[in-house]
Image (tube, rainbow, N blue to C red):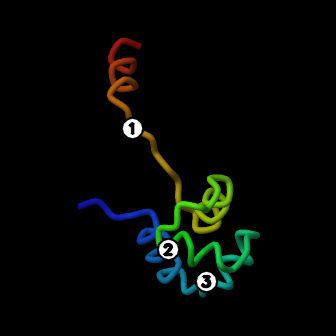
Amino acid sequence: MEETLGAIVQRHRKKSGLSRERLAEIAGVGKTVIYDIEHGKNSVRYTTVMKVLDALNIRIRLISPLEEDSDEKG
């Protein structure tokens, strides 16, 4: 089973030695946002999630079979 976004954020936050409050400060978001992301709440805005991921230096990589086909042709 693949790891959830919340679990990834929590693992990176802890490895970085950051509290939820400190990560929220760094990311420029409310302190409850970090809790909400780590617990899988669907109400967190995309732009807010991206701020948290950026603060943790996490990048999202999108993979699509359609893109793979275009790479082979191009």
Q: Using the image, determine if residue 37 lies above or below residue 46.
A: below
Tag shown at residue 38: 2
Distance (Cα) linking label 3 and label 1: 30 Å
Q: Which residue is mark 1?
A: 63
Nearest the camera: 47 or 41? 41
Going by the numbered disc 3, the residue's amino acid type is: Arg
For the residue labelled by badge 2, is the local secondary structure a helix, a strand or a loop?
Answer: helix
Q: What residue is drawn where x is 59% and y is 85%?
A: 18
Q: What residue is drawn where x is 46% and y is 45%?
A: 61
Side (left or right) of 71 relative to 19: left
**Closer to the camera: disc 2 or disc 3?**
2
Task: Check whether the beta carbons of the residues at disc 2 and disc 1 lie within 8 A of each other.
Answer: no
Q: What residue is drawn where x is 37% and y is 23%?
A: 66
Going by the numbered disc 2, the residue's amino acid type is: Glu
Side (left or right) of 29 relative to 20: right
Label 3: few (<14), some (14–19) or many (≥20) C-alpha neighbours in 10 Å: some
Rendered location of residue 60, percent (x, y): 50, 50
Rendered location of residue 63, percent (x, y): 39, 37
Q: Which residue is mark 3?
A: 20
